[in-house]
Amino acid sequence: MQINYDFLDKYTFKSKDITLANHVIMAPTTLKASLSDGSVSDNELNYYRLRAQGPAMIITEAAYVNDLGRGWEGGISAADDDKIPGLRRLARTIQSGGAKAILQIFAAGRQTTTTILRGQQPVSASSQAYPHGDHEMPRALTHSEISQTISDFAQATKRAILAGFDGVELHGANLYLMQQFFSSDSNRRDDIWGGTAEKRQRFGLAITAKVAQTIEKYADKPFLLGYRQSPEEPMTPGITLDQSLTFAEKLTALSVDYLHLSLNNAFQTPFRDKTDTKKVIDYYRAILPPDYPLIIAGLLKKPEQVEALLDVGGEGTFAALGRELIVEPNWVAKVKNNDETAIRYALSPSDFELLAVPKTLENWLLTRFRNGLPITTDSEFNPKQPWQYYKHVMIKAAKPIDPTQLMTLKKRP
């Protein structure tokens, strides 16, 4: 039986008149495969080329906007004009398969090291180290450095425009600098950039406004502006869901074309309040304009899950697949061709080269990113029931729903 999946329908951003081929987005994946100076490498191009045929939009690994923003070795740089030719090759590679190319831009803040910064001390909103684990103490950015950083985001956006991308995404999630200014844990300032919840929003709003102005000035074709957000932080003090919802309302008034939620699980409930049974996506839908474009990332694997996400979130909801597109670059094509039984949900150690996985990403997949990624050689893995493996790796704070309870299967005519 063929299934008429709604997520295969086209979608047009009314704000920019940009049409996507479907509702599947390739989530930003940290490859750590750029050259030592941040230039795009052939390894990266091969990885994106293999995955450009199916997702409607591909969001790149975060590119740092200035030298102090570098978060890891092998990261992409958007900090200098000499990087534009490589960025242009990256944009064209993604677009060669029909996908829209979005350059995610960021600064790491305190989520880096002196070694990675070539001897420079990490910076943040305040001199406040990350509270979990062994992390370096950052120094607080000065007012002039904050102003320069805002300008650096705008300049990186201009480079993305000149390189031919279809948009940029501001990385305000995953504990990086933009989130650090928003968080009461990392931002202990008492000037215009901190001290109250409203002042802690100022850095992100200023970057967003400046980037929107840059797009208006330099883009000669429709160009998307997205914002990635982590709705909550685990530490206390830290970002609460209510604070993020208030911030999201302000972002949508600043020419932001979509919000991208970084979740542990796409259907999760708030993890700071264990008694709350309402899904995070429902909170956002309640405060956003009807069908406002909302990208959801969080261990999405199966077509039924993606369809269920649209059932919950509405027409303007997009599923961001990360690890699943590492394992299965042809995920969208197999769904379209009614070939779902051929979709791979586990990664064979023998297939890294076949899948164009850079060696740096391979190392991460076998260590840090093992949660949510089954390997065929794992003792727990059952090849006859690959999906059952995820019961052992789902993050406990993210209580998933049964997608089959939400989806109505419709035969194609």
Image (spheres, rainbow, N blue to C red):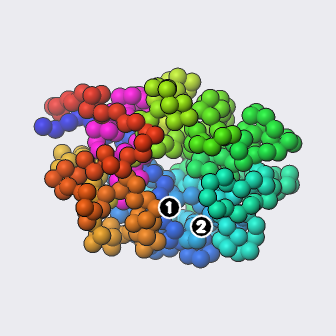
Closest to the observer, 150 or 83: 150
Taking 279 as reference, is 363 above or below it? Answer: below
Q: Position of residue 340 (x, y in %)?
A: 20, 48
Secondary structure at badge 2 equals loop
| Magenta-highlighted residues | 300-326
Closest to the observer, 331 or 272: 272
Q: Residue at x 57, y 24 (%)?
A: 287
In the rendered structure, the answer to whether residue 127 lies left or right of residue 35 reads: right
In the rendered structure, the answer to whether residue 112 lies left or right of residue 12 reads: right
Q: Is 372 covered by the magenta stretch?
A: no
Q: Amino acid at mark 1?
A: Thr
Q: Position of residue 13 (x, y in %)?
A: 49, 36
In the rendered structure, the answer to whether residue 380 lies left or right of residue 158 reads: left
Q: Residue furthest left?
A: 1
Q: Residue at x 58, y 71 (%)?
A: 73
Q: Is 305 covered by the magenta stretch?
A: yes
Residue that label 2 marks: 72
Closest to the observer, 222 or 141: 141
Q: Position of residue 283 (x, y in %)?
A: 52, 26
Decide if residue 213 is in sight here.
no
